[in-house]
Amino acid sequence: MRMTVLGARGSVPVEGAAFSICGGATSCFKVEAGDEEIYLDAGSGIVSAKPSPHSRLTILLTHMHLDHVVGLPFFLALGQPRRLIDIYARSCSGLTPKEALDRLIAPPFWPVTLEQYPSDVKIHVLPDETLMLNDVAVDAIESSHPNDSIVYRLTRRGRSLVYATDFEHNAPDRVEALIKFADGCDLLLYDAQYTVEEYERYRGFGHSTAEVGIEIAARAGAKRLMLVHHAPWRTDDQIAELERRLSERHENISFARIGDEIEL
Ligand SMILES: [Zn+2]
Ligand SMILES: [Zn+2]
């Protein structure tokens, strides 16, 4: 599998010279595995995606918060006639994924619905059991976040990636469940929106810190940790400084930068 960072910003897209290295686009991570092209979330990062004409396209949404779906109406493949795009998510706030997306991507918020694009979009409820996308196994557990977010694990040929964005460490049972779920993974993507100091101010907002990510990664035996969902105010320089400080004591840690690629 190859994972590419298309968007690692949290909450809202930002732009400017201070954000050019880590990027201002919101959550979207592309995973290529054989003929499968899988997008984890459809934040504004998906706008820059250039899907291969030969790939089967799947979008796995963690939840419906705007920073994770705002790029969806601009996904290039939506304009390709009869192109099949499968979107999976869990029901949230009492709505199926289709009901939720049809509320947002529709007038007056947007001129057309997903069904009106030339492509063939199918919106599914993510099953409780493992979903197989060719030879990629997709599993999920509940996150700890307002409005029913989930954590994904993608496994192929013994390699695995866990995508734990929009996760707050305030519920011990959810933390333990995540550690178990991420057991031995090759790459853990973890929500590090806040610094430890900021977290005190934003308790209950549904996000975490790099320090907690390091602890969870260590306890899960994750081989590599990539920190994602950067606060909208966090500049490249600040991220580099955080990374330098944490890397002194811990190995295989990085903060996601736009365009980063990891082979698994
Ligand atoms: Zn988010
Ligand atoms: Zn969220």
Image: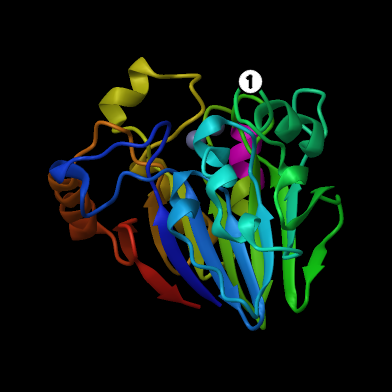
Q: Is residue 95 above or below residue 38?
A: above
Q: Is residue 130 above or below residue 8?
A: below
- Residue plotted at (16% across, 55% down): 244
Residue 101 is left or right of residue 28, and the answer is right
Residue drawn at x 21%, y 55% is 21
Instruction: Give the total of numbered labels.
Output: 1
Q: Is residue 69 left or right of residue 252?
A: right
Q: Residue at x 65, y 76 (%)?
A: 55
In the picture as drawn, the residue positioned furthest to the top comes out as 201
Which is nearer the eye, 146 or 48?
Answer: 48
Q: Which residues are magenta?
A: 172-177
Measured as percent of width and height from the top left, residue 25 is found at 38, 45
Q: Position of residue 106 (x, y in %)?
A: 69, 29
The picture places residue 192, in percent across and down from the top left corner, at 38, 41
Task: Name the residue type under label 1.
Answer: Pro
Q: Quick check: 50 above or below 64?
A: below
The foreground one among 99 and 217 is: 99
SS at badge 1: loop
Query: Residue 203 lies in magenta, yes or no?
Result: no
Residue 182 seen: no
Q: Is residue 119 visible?
A: yes
- In percent of width and height, residue 64 lies at 64, 34
The reply to whether the magenta stretch includes residue 175 is yes
Quadrant for ligand 2 reads top right
Residue where numbered disc 1 is placed: 108
Q: Nearer the viewer, residue 105 or 223?
A: 105
Magenta-drawn stretch, dominant element (helix, strand or loop): helix
Q: Which of the 4 quarters of the picture holds residue 231?
A: top left
Residue at mark 1: C-beta within 8 A of ligand 2: no
